[in-house]
Amino acid sequence: MSDTLLTDDFRLDGHVALVTGGSRGIGRAIALALARHGADVAITYVSQSEGAQQTAAGIREAGRRCYVAACDVADGDAVVATVEAVTASLGPPDILVNNAGITRDTLLMRMKDEDWDTVIATDLRGAFVATRACMRAMMKNRWGRIINIGSVVAAMGNPGQANYAAAKAGLGGFTRSIAREVGSRNITANLIAPGFIETDITADLPEELVARVKEQIPLQRIGSPDDVAPLVVFLAGESGRYITGQTINVDGGLLTT
């Protein structure tokens, strides 16, 4: 089923989106959905060059322009350079999706400093640096959408993911703060918190574990990246213009149990 929404409020023609971590999974689904609704889309990746090119091909098949950048969002200088390059190629990004994230799972007693620091640097600091780099143009143009991709783990916790949960919880406070800072400039900031979503990371999990997770989800199924992407389109378009500072769970009801 196509994710294309037909009303004008969902059209993104004339806008430029930057999706970090757009080479696969949720990031790819978001990038393609934005392109199908009219946005030109830039994506970043770290190691998945082939996947990034596949995403780019899909964006171009949708009739939109695309820019692909190898960029580790944990590297602040690289992020600034990437935003400058996107601006030169497509125009200044006025839709920013901070999706890039990593995990370094292990129990706290075994967690190394670098396991903590690396996850915080990518999942939290990366969003800060990318948002700051895009903010000036959004403020000048008095229009912008900042959409951060978190996780329900921030609210529920998970053994072995203290670093990941802390980073994603930090994104919540970050989102609410910038929503208050820039709302007067017609810029919104929201956080989407996916639940258990089928990605390359979850594909290798034992079937018994997946079955136990399904039992906790009222909808009795694992989500897909395409369950997340339409919400990004909604928040990026005019239909989402009066929603800001919010955390919206896309989890099949997991947090209601």
Image (cartoon, rainbow, N blue to C red):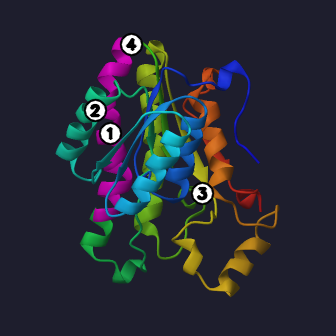
Q: Distance between the Cα atoms at labels 1 and 2?
A: 5 Å
Residue to which mark 3 is pinned: 152
**Kind of residue sitting beneath label 4:** Asn
Residue to which mark 4 is pinned: 141
Q: Mark 4 vs mark 3: which is more N-terminal?
A: 4
Q: Distance between the Cα atoms at labels 3 and 1?
A: 22 Å
Residue to which mark 2 is pinned: 133
What range of the chain is rendered magenta? 118-141
Q: Mark 4 vs mark 1: which is more N-terminal?
A: 1
**Kind of residue sitting beneath label 2:** Ala
Secondary element type, mark 4: helix
Q: Looking at the magenta stretch, what is its main secondary structure? A: helix
Q: Mark 2 vs mark 4: which is more N-terminal?
A: 2
Q: Do the residues labelled 4 and 1 touch (CB within 8 Å)?
A: no
- Residue 149 place in picture, x, y as percent: 51, 48
Q: Is residue 137 magenta?
A: yes
**Kind of residue sitting beneath label 1:** Ala
Residue to which mark 1 is pinned: 130
Query: What residue do we see at 28% from left, 32% from top?
Result: 133
Secondary element type, mark 2: helix
Disc marking residue 73: none
